[in-house]
Image: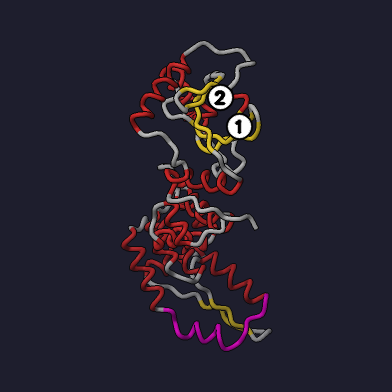
Amino acid sequence: MMKKKALGRGLSALLSDTPTDDKLEVEISAAANLVATPPVTETVQTVVVNNLNEIPVDQIEVNPFQPRQHFDQDALLELSESILVHGIIQPITVRRLAQNQYQLISGERRFQASKLAGLKQIPAYIRSADDQQMLEMALIENIQRENLNPIEISLSYQRLITECNLKQEELGDRVGKNRSTVTNYLRLLKLPPDIQVALRDHRVSMGHARAIVSVENPDTQLFIFKKILSEDLSVRKVEELARQLTTTTPAETEKVTTSTPASKEISQLQSKLSSHFGTKISVKSDGTKGEIKIPFLSIEDLNRILDIIKV
């Protein structure tokens, strides 16, 4: 197991040797002037300017621990055009692998956009980091982006816990969140895949998802999810529905599920029917005969079920 190192709070602590604002302003100005200069020959070596390094782009490799796999190409083109006009305003951060060989820690969008802009060099801070620190820095920078969806955040939290051997309290310190916030995000990964995809694609909100995950039964979760999509339910309505479904589980249904263990075939049939109708279906059989029970919560819910079976 990789030995974990204490890295402090958040990305700012991980990169604690970043210059102060006054110094950074001078460095950014110097970097912008250097970016605007004509391309240098391919034999150029790294130039140091007030602790800011100008590194040839062909000496930098991407971060293998980058949690974000997709970059919007239109956004990259817009950024590259801005770089051509204004230069690199915020330097990237790299670690040195060998002489004239570096690896990204943060700033892959700026790095890719700079290559699109045709830059030969890019301003960068050089930091010391092992593989675990690289992963942690990349994940934390990813989490601190403003356009992440809740599932991306949840997956990043989970990776920090499992791959960096962090406890939830430590994770909260790293990302500047309290433990309850971290827990709420991690719980989203317990939702059925259909709901996770909808949350990722912004078809349901974080508030909707938190209300759904308060219900333990996956079939009931899917039922609530389908009602959100079909009836455009508000978060408050979903919270009320979740409470209702949690407190009104029919005793008879519970009796059926606990009295006689269902066969594998019956269990699979119940699961398929529950998914199809968006509600908990009870199937009881003695091998030759039996019954199927389809509960409904309201007249509207009954009409929905009747529409499905075309009655």
Category of crowding for the residue at label 1, using alpha-carbon neighbours closer than 10 angstroms: few (below 14), some (14–19), many (at least 20): many
Question: At label 2, which amino acid type do we have?
Answer: Ile
Answer left or right for 203 relative to 309: left
Name the quadrant containing residue 207: bottom left
Q: Position of residue 296 (x, y in %)?
A: 43, 73
Region of the chain picked out in magenta, as a range? 249-264
For label 1, the SS is: strand
Magenta highlight on residue 173? no
Category of crowding for the residue at label 2, using alpha-carbon neighbours closer than 10 angstroms: few (below 14), some (14–19), many (at least 20): many
For label 2, the SS is: strand
State the residue position of label 1.
102
Magenta: main secondary structure: helix
* Picture residue at 47% right of the left edge, 57% below the top: 171
* Picture residue at 54% right of the left edge, 65% below the top: 275
* Picture residue at 46% right of the left edge, 59% below the top: 170
Closest to the observer: 113 or 201? 113
Q: Is residue 224 above or below residue 45?
A: below
State the residue position of label 2.
55
Q: Quadrant of the N terminus?
A: bottom right
Does the image show residue 306?
no
